[in-house]
Image (cartoon, coloured by chain):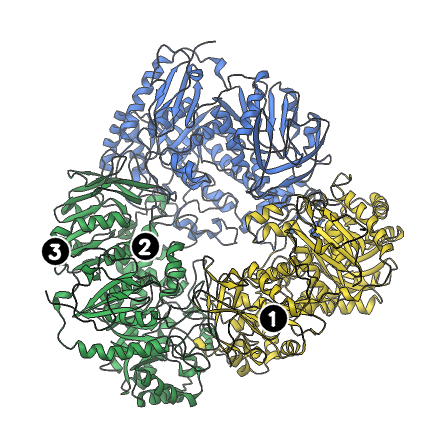
Chain colours: A yellow, B green, C blue
Amino acid sequence: MRLGVCYYPEHWDRNIWREDAKRMIDLGLEVVRIGEFSWAMIEPAPGVYEWNWLDEAVDVLGCAGLKLILGTPTATPPKWLVDTHPDILAHDREGRPRQFGSRRHYCFSSDQYAAESRRIVTAMVERYGQNNAVEAWQTDNEYGCHDTVRSYSPEAAKAFRKWLQFRYGDIAALNEAWGTIFWSQVYRSFDEVDLPNLTVTEPNPSHVFDFYRFSSDQVVAYNKMQVNIIRANSPGREIYHNFMGHFTDFDHFRLSEDIDIAGWDSYPLGFLDVEDYPAAEKEKFMRQGHPDFAGFHHDLYRGCADGRLAVMEQQPGPVNWARHNPAPLPGMVRLWTHEAAAHGAELLCYFRWRQAPFAQEHMHAGLLRPDNSPAQAYEEVQRAAKEFVDLKTQNESASFKSYAPKVALIFSYETQWMSEVAPQGAQWNYIRIVMQWYSVARSLGCDIDIVAPGSELDKYEFVLVPSLFHVSASALEAFSKTRATIFFGPRSGSKTETIQIPKNLAPGPLQEIFPLRVTHSESFPDFHTEHGKFAGEKVFSHIWLDHVETSLAPLVKSETGAGLLYRSDRIWMFTTVPDENFLYLALTAAQENSVGNIKSLPTGLRMRANGELQYAFNYNAEISDLPSQFFPDIPTTLIGAKTIFPADVACWRKQQN
Amino acid sequence: MRLGVCYYPEHWDRNIWREDAKRMIDLGLEVVRIGEFSWAMIEPAPGVYEWNWLDEAVDVLGCAGLKLILGTPTATPPKWLVDTHPDILAHDREGRPRQFGSRRHYCFSSDQYAAESRRIVTAMVERYGQNNAVEAWQTDNEYGCHDTVRSYSPEAAKAFRKWLQFRYGDIAALNEAWGTIFWSQVYRSFDEVDLPNLTVTEPNPSHVFDFYRFSSDQVVAYNKMQVNIIRANSPGREIYHNFMGHFTDFDHFRLSEDIDIAGWDSYPLGFLDVEDYPAAEKEKFMRQGHPDFAGFHHDLYRGCADGRLAVMEQQPGPVNWARHNPAPLPGMVRLWTHEAAAHGAELLCYFRWRQAPFAQEHMHAGLLRPDNSPAQAYEEVQRAAKEFVDLKTQNESASFKSYAPKVALIFSYETQWMSEVAPQGAQWNYIRIVMQWYSVARSLGCDIDIVAPGSELDKYEFVLVPSLFHVSASALEAFSKTRATIFFGPRSGSKTETIQIPKNLAPGPLQEIFPLRVTHSESFPDFHTEHGKFAGEKVFSHIWLDHVETSLAPLVKSETGAGLLYRSDRIWMFTTVPDENFLYLALTAAQENSVGNIKSLPTGLRMRANGELQYAFNYNAEISDLPSQFFPDIPTTLIGAKTIFPADVACWRKQQN
Amino acid sequence: MRLGVCYYPEHWDRNIWREDAKRMIDLGLEVVRIGEFSWAMIEPAPGVYEWNWLDEAVDVLGCAGLKLILGTPTATPPKWLVDTHPDILAHDREGRPRQFGSRRHYCFSSDQYAAESRRIVTAMVERYGQNNAVEAWQTDNEYGCHDTVRSYSPEAAKAFRKWLQFRYGDIAALNEAWGTIFWSQVYRSFDEVDLPNLTVTEPNPSHVFDFYRFSSDQVVAYNKMQVNIIRANSPGREIYHNFMGHFTDFDHFRLSEDIDIAGWDSYPLGFLDVEDYPAAEKEKFMRQGHPDFAGFHHDLYRGCADGRLAVMEQQPGPVNWARHNPAPLPGMVRLWTHEAAAHGAELLCYFRWRQAPFAQEHMHAGLLRPDNSPAQAYEEVQRAAKEFVDLKTQNESASFKSYAPKVALIFSYETQWMSEVAPQGAQWNYIRIVMQWYSVARSLGCDIDIVAPGSELDKYEFVLVPSLFHVSASALEAFSKTRATIFFGPRSGSKTETIQIPKNLAPGPLQEIFPLRVTHSESFPDFHTEHGKFAGEKVFSHIWLDHVETSLAPLVKSETGAGLLYRSDRIWMFTTVPDENFLYLALTAAQENSVGNIKSLPTGLRMRANGELQYAFNYNAEISDLPSQFFPDIPTTLIGAKTIFPADVACWRKQQN
């Protein structure tokens, strides 16, 4: 894995660029990402281009030996462009234009903005597309950030109607798919269909879901437009985009089909703060981030782009945008760096080179402080860079194929959207349930691939499906073909692809491989749990309960007699959301006929193998010991030891079995 | 009481209608309610009527022996109508049109919508008004649902000005009534008066209150317009409307003057979930609903329409619209059915026949599942239907007049609106206080009539007035004439009819019958209680405290010396909101000179007599015993026994005293 | 200190005015404030003036011997004015006009409103400016109430651009000051700059901060316009404005430069209720208000107007506008009255003479009830008025200069705005931190002056700077010159005047007087505290932590090794927000080389000297004893004694040291 940094030459005096470049090289960095917010500097007035400064920046950085990733500058159209074409602005759910003054102030459905984007991207790619220093491109920046995927503008309405027409062909098909006969909503033509905002009460869920699908497709199409320009004008350069954490408003699997490498921006502390964890957990990991935050996204985005992963922005210190912004525990920046490598990243860029003393992110740390002295992470990066050189030497033998993940977790953007559109219970939170399943599996020491529904599953021994509302024909086929043990969570197969109830009721098509039918479902408030007995322990579940008709005897029954867990041969199915211990017991019970090696890691420790290298990470603020079963009789480690210091790493060469 | 069901033939293939009708009859249903969301199917394009399908549906259902209630379809105007006349849309408090895409997307003040409503209702009534199968009509559907009574549209502003002109005659009277001299708000003409939304800070409370009264009147007038059309064209048919639970934005007493039977839609689980009960109570009754929810509404709406009550929609399983949607405990659907009969309902319709697999309510249970197999409630309905046949046989002797309720509770829509407009304390919640008084009286085993202020009170022995902000001349007369024991809660008589302070201060006109005057009042945060001693116990109150001048000695004094409860002859008056035990002790203390028979039922048990039949209901999830004083030496029961199973019912013939 | 009352003759029949005036005099009142909401009565139609009623009111009150303060009526423009010029309305953050129907419905940037204001103020001042009964004017009423300082109207946008042009001269300077190169926000001209609302995500903080400064300047300019008219037409009359509690949207120091006396409106109970105190504290002081609420504002506003202070509105009983509205504990109205005198007020007016039975404030108590009988506070006012006469006699010797406050607390409106614009941590609340420092110092018995940054500090022995984000040249000079002990809180000197990071990092210019530099800062969630050891005790801090480079040894180190408190000679600096005990220990540790006399008062007791009179106040609902060190061997008191009853006062003549 190479190391790099995000850099904004336009923020600094030209005099300092050369020294910056030299210090990057000295620090062990090989890559620099620039340009993604520079439109107003490149084109300060309509049609007036000022390449001079960027030419020089590219030249200085390139000559110093750095490889450049250039960002297309479309995330921040200049004020003059917004003033000339106010209809490029997105509209919010309240129907108001979302104004200039920050970033991402454009609507993915604006034809005008598409044209302007084509113009500026073409100009940039034509100028630098064959520059030797430029090894790659990044399209735009963090698509969807600040809730920008779904726009309720007139432009979006127009595009939505076209999309519907293309999808359904004639309006009768739409009426059928959405069930518009309900509440007298029948449409006579596509022109009658509005966006589903500002309705008196909840709009038709199929309508909203199609709007979400449409909105995702618009992002994919907009990105594809930029990709096409780059491919045509910058041969041999790879294309990245930088995704975000826990962001699901567009289908990252589909967008990734058009790029080469799925990058993402990793801010573990900020996300721990803004997300919904118990206070005790937030305090325990306040300066480390949640132990599964980075790992989950590495595995998810690696799965999006056929195994090609990068961290485009790595938090190097306190940020500015969370509700509270503590500093990483000393060691964490190095830990996150090694962890990205362990999960298969090819590149990790720190964000940013030097803290800008002005504007929205003036309190966002960099590798350098605003006065140009080294900040907190500088030394950790230096140390990690040296360790990378060493590890590369150690790891030159071929990867051990035997260490590829044996566990797949299926993640479905459509299930997330359906969960938002038709939750049926306020506690139901798909992404949180997915994270819980991921965490339990990681705490068992498993390496995990995260894959899209319908992916080939033959190479796995365990397949985890926390929930999959709509089971497509290809997904059913993959489940049928694999010989893996499969665990399904509740609500799987409960919807058609337009959010209707399947003709044969839930779990719909899964009834072909699992002899069970849902008669009715309950959702519960947070204070209600169901409980039963499993493996000699009292186990708990919550949030949801499917009542079923089946010939199977339940493995676990609730105190009121409802089955909570069923098994038919190699397939297990929960009718409820198990808590972590219940899930842990179920996964270990399935061990005998599967991957084996399932034991539990102490809190805060995580393992991950990459090729022949086995890593262990200590997310705790205290010293922690690896249990012996995870650290068998090892002659020598490459980094660290069985006893791992706070925020520290161990790495050793895996033994061939 | 007859049983029926809500049915949407337009959702299903015509082939299945005949079988549906037969199964309804077989199940013991006699009535079917149809049509209330069918405008777009009846008139798919402007002026193009398609009666064919509805003719057939009416024919099939009628021929099977079912009696039909037809709903006018005005709750869901079609998209083409909204596109043609966008000014029919209501506007929300934020000043925005409330868009098409769900239901109730119309403004009660739109002249255009009134005209369109007249047109479609006339067409429908002319076609089916004299059809033999049609025994009744329902106007529109759930007036006010989704906060639709109060519209802030230009049409509403225009109508409001007319309403004010009619009410006040000249603008000087309005200025006087509202006290517009305060903050320089004097109006020179009615044309200057706007709707009271989007003001800088709180608008004039008299202004807002008149807007609330106006909005209620608009609903009444709109309904009356439909009623007139039906009366003219469908002689001999009765008219229903289906009210909602805990909904107070219009005056249901006034609207009910124009219809024949007050129907309401009973969803006990959904309401328990969305309303503000303590978590422990929510968990205890999660699958049963609050034991007083249905009873309260039966008694209120029976009081609205001179004793004529129906349940137009009865929850038969999990619904889709609450935050959490559990399933009724087995038995509850049968219990709710008997309870409606006990409270005097003439008809109860389950909602709905078969669960629709599409659109907003695809997760709302019916009597049948979407695959046409019987759902959870089917058998319970079957059992209840049989029991009804038996009970009817048993109950053929005349009703015992001696068992008519001896307790009246006065409910005032105006007090609710004044409480919203001028709460003076954030904990003050009129409807919640009313529910508390109702619950205490029900837990004492009392049967209760809920009546409007000003109603004749002579036939009662106990009158409960949890609060009555404005005491009108007729209300004062009724209080003066009756010989009943009356309990007043705080703030009674504290406002004039335009929310001014009475010239003689609170309790205003009540000073004629109670020698006490309020000098000033306090409202408290939730953490503050007052306490005193009563009947040997420490008693608590909260939320509110009136300080008074009076010749009476307080029955209870707070620790700081304020009187909490006063009595003058047959009238008792609280200066504060008593907690349940304080209220219980006060009611029982008044027992000697009143109805007697006041004892307390165990939690979750409720009693109710109808004619000579005495019912008892167990809302608990556990077996419960009726105390002996409520179950005197009874030779035989018609249903159940002294020991009542969870969600079960007992019924016996009352003994003549 | 004189006593007065707020009076609205227009609310009452003229017949009662004469009696009202006589009762005021009899009660001991000398001043009456009238007129501030009377525009619609003075000018009922455009250009039609009706002075008759006001002439008579002024005459009646003046003849009775009362001195009048006339309010300009601009806080409530009449409806006809709004209808004629809708562009006088302010716009809210959502971009909507804030409508007529309450008060303060105007935009400070409206040229049209400025013209109308000039017209009505001129007319009023020309009529009464030389009237003998009129001794003073109040401009408008409670500038900024209901969030009205910041308007997002087109008029405001226009004025903002002019303001920016004036401030920055050319657009390049603005781009530099705001750092618009970040996120491509570069402007080409001032015309391109919009107001910073409705942006996609957070706008540029320098942009928002300038908008806040601009908005404050608009208030100052609007007030100045009125002041100029009064000065020109009403020679010899003094000018007041009535400020509010804890209101910081404009710079009260700057506005006060143009008036003579800083008045404010004191509602201790309402503020306790709506502000963010722990429930236990809210309950303890529910009927008294927070013991530091009035004192803080007395000290702050006295500091605004060079020592000239008045209370323009004093709560006399329950109010109507808080969430909960209890009544003052008997005695509190008298206590608040004496306390205002102790803090140097020249005048205190009760709000209002008689409770109005109508409109928004019909539940707001007055000295009289709506039926004209004395309300709760009447007797307390009578008693206080008599005591004032006695004290004046006792206090005729010259003030002891030695008792002027030795402690200054620096309060910065700009720091408050910067805290709102760039909090960097959700727990950071500048005004709350200031209140905490003030409370700790008051509980030590200190009298305090609150002064603006840059004020001369030579006369103080202790200077408290809870935080001061931007340290101006004049502020630095004052800190450098004084020989006082100075305590700085965290974040001091952390920003430039346009919210950039100082070139030499935080604490910026303070590095000239304190050898320490901040490397990075952390903000914490509410559940995280840092702790260390100081003066033998475990001490805690929270919210914020600056990590520093310094040659100084920390006086306190956190458990993770960070310095929490540093000292260099006479300057002490916290890197964190200390809790109250930590701050208390630090202040007392600094005692040796400073004011001395630092001991702690029991909870709820407060002391304050004015000239030779020493007061003590008991805010508790229980009897409390003054500790001996605060009540040395005193031969005789003027009011009360060492043991103070609930809500009572003690006062004695200070002994010369």
Residue closest to the eye, B15 or C122 = B15
Instruction: Say above or below: B556 vs C21.
Output: below
Label whose residue precedes the other's in the sequence (3 or 2): 2
Residue in the picture at 45% in, 59% down? A528
| Residue marked by disc 2 | B432
What chain does badge 2 belong to?
A: B
Q: CA distance from mark 1 to mark 2?
A: 43 Å
Residue in the picture at 30% in, 34% down? C353
Residue C127 sits in quarter: top left
| Residue marked by disc 1 | A213
| Left or right: residue B83 compared with residue A657 | left
Disc 1 residue type (three-letter): Arg
Crowd class of label 2 (few under 14; some 14 to 19; many from 20; radius 10 Å): some
Q: CA distance from mark 3 to mark 2?
A: 27 Å
| Residue marked by disc 3 | B482
| Left or right: residue C521 compared with residue A532 | right
Disc 2 residue type (three-letter): Arg
- Please say if the residues under marks 3 and 2 sit with CB atoms less than 8 Å apart: no
Instruction: Say above or below: A549 vs C52.
Output: below
